[in-house]
Image (cartoon, rainbow, N blue to C red):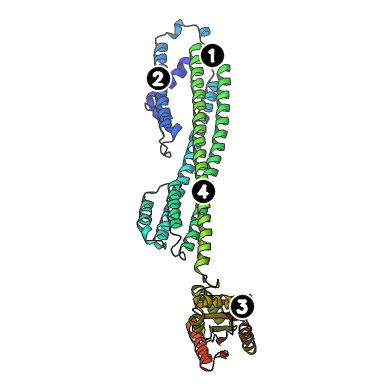
Amino acid sequence: MLDNLLAQLQALMKQSPHFDEEILRLLFNEEKTTINSATQNNLKIALTQFIKQKQLEFTQHIDALELISVDTVSTKDIPEITASSLQLVMNQLERFITLYAQVSAQLTNELNGVKEEQGTLILTHKDNLTHLYETIDIHYQLHSALNELAGALSTVETTEQLLGNVEEVIALLLKSMLSEKEHSKYFVKDIHREISELKVINQQSEDIGRAGQQQQQQWDKASQHNVGNLKALSKRMKVSDSDAKALGNEITLLQNALVDKTDIDSKLFTLQQKQIDKLNKKLAQTEQEASTYHSQLVEQRLINMQDSLTKLPNRKALEQKFESNFSAAKQSGQALWVAVADIDNFKSINDNYGHSAGDKTLQVIAGALSNSIRDSEFIARYGGEEFVLLIPELPQNAINTVLNRLRERIKSIPFKFKDKKVQITLSIGVTKVKAGDSDRQVSFDRADKALYQAKRQGRDRVIIY
């Protein structure tokens, strides 16, 4: 029976001269696997040498058996081996190899999928950032540095490199705080979005890594169980001492290979986790820098939108507020009044009492006007001694009363220059935004004409157009 089994195995090997290559293809699933790490290549070479060596030993063993006459050997000298027990061992080995191939292919496919997805997302973010860099309003002295960073995006391949590039751009923007920041606020918003999406990518990588580790641990556990079954079966089999020793050696080598693989997997996962932790720290640092820049940008924007003398909103702030209120009034049909107020004879104050007296006058009047309006109303210093008020949702019969009350309040302020009491008055021109007004400038020009009419009629009055 033993000679018959050996003859069948020898015939099988002769029919399949590339037996060792087929085993390796099952183990590494070369058609589906793209991993080329040095560790796995070394393992593959070692397995190839091992299989060839065992194949040679097996062939020599068969040749030696052929030299022995079956008639000269007592059947009691040959331990009995059953076909069912041998088939059971082969089935266990086949299950082990199949499980290894399936798990390796699955992990490889998942890893390749994550890498492909990250590559696509990084490419998208590179394009987005390239467009953002082209639209940043930055100080002219920093243009060359910004262009270099924009060009460097073409060589970026990892999220870490992408974050480093963004970090450098934020540093440039911090240097450019004294320049106009209106466009930069939109850039910061986009940077926050990019950082959030990169954090999602990083979290996905971490989740995939942990899931892979769990699968590897499950596979290791199942493999160790299969090896244990093989050991138990080999002990129950009745084979020659040399065959038993050879089978035991192979199982031991297989078990050692499993231990090595588990160690490699653990080291790779540890390395991957360190890289993810490093990226998480970099993300947190970049996000903090972006938040700091955003806070400084908001502060700078408030400064840019405020009149330095009166602390009222300036002309630029008025234009933005007027534009939004004008559009809302046109769409809703609700009333929006535009009032232009001018200090009467302000030039004489500067000429007679000096510019410091004129500045003080502007500050006092600005404070009085600001304290006299409702929360829904808006006032800004338009320039010089002119102020503009936007008054929404006020009936036609009330606007004249409200503005005259405001005019009387300014008139009652007890100004005193060089021990001389001086009465300050306002002339106010006002109009209502009309359905036919094509833009806010049309409404403003009409209020401005009403102001000039108030001046011509003797000042210190309110004229409504």
State which quadrant residue 47 falls in: top left
Q: Looking at the image, can residue 120 be seen?
A: no
Checking the image for residue 80, the label placed there is 1
- The amino acid type, in three-letter code, at marker 4 is Gln
**Residue picked out by circle 3:** 368
Judge depth for marks 4 and 2 and give the one in front: 4
Q: Using the numbered discs, state the Cα–Cα distance from disc 3 to disc 1 in whole angstroms.
A: 113 Å
Residue 154 percent across, percent down from the top left: 36, 52
Secondary structure beneath dot 2 equals helix
Q: Nearer the viewer, residue 150 or 124?
A: 150
Q: Who comes first in sequence, dot 4 or dot 3?
A: 4
What is the three-letter code of the residue carrying label 2?
A: Gln
Crowding around mark 4 (Cα neighbors within 10 Å: few <14, some 14 to 19, many 20+) is some
Quadrant including the C terminus: bottom right
In the rendered view, tell whether residue 433 sits above or below residue 101: below
Residue 175, percent across and down? 43, 56
Q: Residue at x 42, y 8 (%)?
A: 69
Residue under the point 56% across and 78% down:
361
Q: Which residue is mark 2?
A: 53
Q: Nearer the viewer, mark 1 or mark 2?
A: 2
Type of the residue with mark 3: Ala
Foreground residue, 412 or 402?
412
Of label 1 and label 2, which has the lower sequence position?
2
Where is 163 relative to 46, above or below?
A: below
Label 4 – label 1 distance at C-alpha: 71 Å
Say the numbered circle drawn on residue 285: 4
Q: Secondary structure at mark 1?
A: loop
